[in-house]
């Protein structure tokens, strides 16, 4: 089973992908996480991607398509994948369909998480992640000057550099220009399911589980 999480930055794609992957025993593949890891390790991919990410722009299609093909070919992708953050452009979506067709697969479901822009900016500004265990939190009123710590492992939480408001605004513009056309692309294939992302995390998950394709 191949599931694509579609939606603007801050909509909850990563949060839902993680929960769905656990529930359905699928691999969670977040291209943002792969790129951040590459940046942290200073690999060639990381060095290439970093300036684009810092500006809130997209890493070039050929790089992303190469990356996703490599990951989809790995054995742990065989039982199914939840794609979080890919595809983000029409060429990426077309390349994905072609790559899947070659291995006798297809995108089975696309969950489009709908959230209004003002809430996205609030969520992005309140996003804190744990550098040790990867958990993501929403801290809307951080105590000034106080460190925010991970509930799970106690590490000091971090904010993504591209979650600063100016970069976040640019990412939203890029989303509307380059990624939003995918909504119609997948709707026309009959596999898009719109989910009201303005609900609790649990209720969003419930709606997704109710809209899975029959297996
Ligand atoms: P995306 O991967 O789409 O950018 P995330 O899953 O990282 O989004 O979520 C963005 C922020 O919003 C995180 O801080 C996350 O904890 C929080 N969040 C996720 N889902 C919800 C929700 N349903 N309601 C409120 N906050 C949420
Ligand atoms: P968000 O969770 O806010 O939607 P991501 O973590 O998915 O953001 O992505 C962070 C950044 O990584 C993007 O702003 C972009 O620079 C880069 N990136 C991630 N996925 C892709 C992709 N499929 N194509 C191009 N760039 C990407
Ligand atoms: Zn932690």
Image (tube, rainbow, N blue to C red):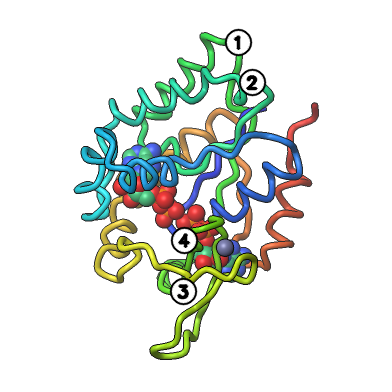
Crowdedness near tag 3: few (<14), some (14–19) or many (≥20) residues, C-alpha within 10 Å? some
Q: Is mark 3 within 8 Å of ligand 1?
A: yes
What's the distance in space between the residues labelled 2 and 4, CA to CA? Answer: 28 Å
Asked if 112 appears above or below 102 in the picture, the reply is below
Looking at this view, is 198 or 164 the one in front? 164
Crowdedness near tag 1: few (<14), some (14–19) or many (≥20) residues, C-alpha within 10 Å? few
Please indicate, yes or no, whether residue 115 appears anywhere in the rendered image: no
Q: Earlier in the sequence, mark 2 or mark 4?
A: 4
What's the distance in space between the residues labelled 1 and 3, CA to CA? Answer: 41 Å
Please indicate, yes or no, whether residue 169 appears anywhere in the rendered image: yes
What SS does tag 2 mark?
A: loop
Q: Earlier in the sequence, mark 4 or mark 3?
A: 4
Q: Are marks 2 and 3 in contact (CB under 8 Å)?
A: no
Measuring from the top left, give residue 94's x and y in whole percent: 41, 23
Quarter containing the N terminus: top right
Q: Earlier in the sequence, mark 2 or mark 3?
A: 2
What's the distance in space between the residues labelled 4 and 3, CA to CA? Answer: 10 Å
Residue 126's mark? 3
Q: Is residue 77 left or right of residue 19?
A: left
Asked if 112 appears above or below 189 in the picture, the reply is below
Residue 78's mark? 2
Q: Which residue is mark 4?
A: 10
Q: Earlier in the sequence, mark 1 or mark 3?
A: 1
Q: Which residue is mark 1?
A: 104
What residue sits 47% from the left and 68% below the top? 127
């Amino acid at each position: 089973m191949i599931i694509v999480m579609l939606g603007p930055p801050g909509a909850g794609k990563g949060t839902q992908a993680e929960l769905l992957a656990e529930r359905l025993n699928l691999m969670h593949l977040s291209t943002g996480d792969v790129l951040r890891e590459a940046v942290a390790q200073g690999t060639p991919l990381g060095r290439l991607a970093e300036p684009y990410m810092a500006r809130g722009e997209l890493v070039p299609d050929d790089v992303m398509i190469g990356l996703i093909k490599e990951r989809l070919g790995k054995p742990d992708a065989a039982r199914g994948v939840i794609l979080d953050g890919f595809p983000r452009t029409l060429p990426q979506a077309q390349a994905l369909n072609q790559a899947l067709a070659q291995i006798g697969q297809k995108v089975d479901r696309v969950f489009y998480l709908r959230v209004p822009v003002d809430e996205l900016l609030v969520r992005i500004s309140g996003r804190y992640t744990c550098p040790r265990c990867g958990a993501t939190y929403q801290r809307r009123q951080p105590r000034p000057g106080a460190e925010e710590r991970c509930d799970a492992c106690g590490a000091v939480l971090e904010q993504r550099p591209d979650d600063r408001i100016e970069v976040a605004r640019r990412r939203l513009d890029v989303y509307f220009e380059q990624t939003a056309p995918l909504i119609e692309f997948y709707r026309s294939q009959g596999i898009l399911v719109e989910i009201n992302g303005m609900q609790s995390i649990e209720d969003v998950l419930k709606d997704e589980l109710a809209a899975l394709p029959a297996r």
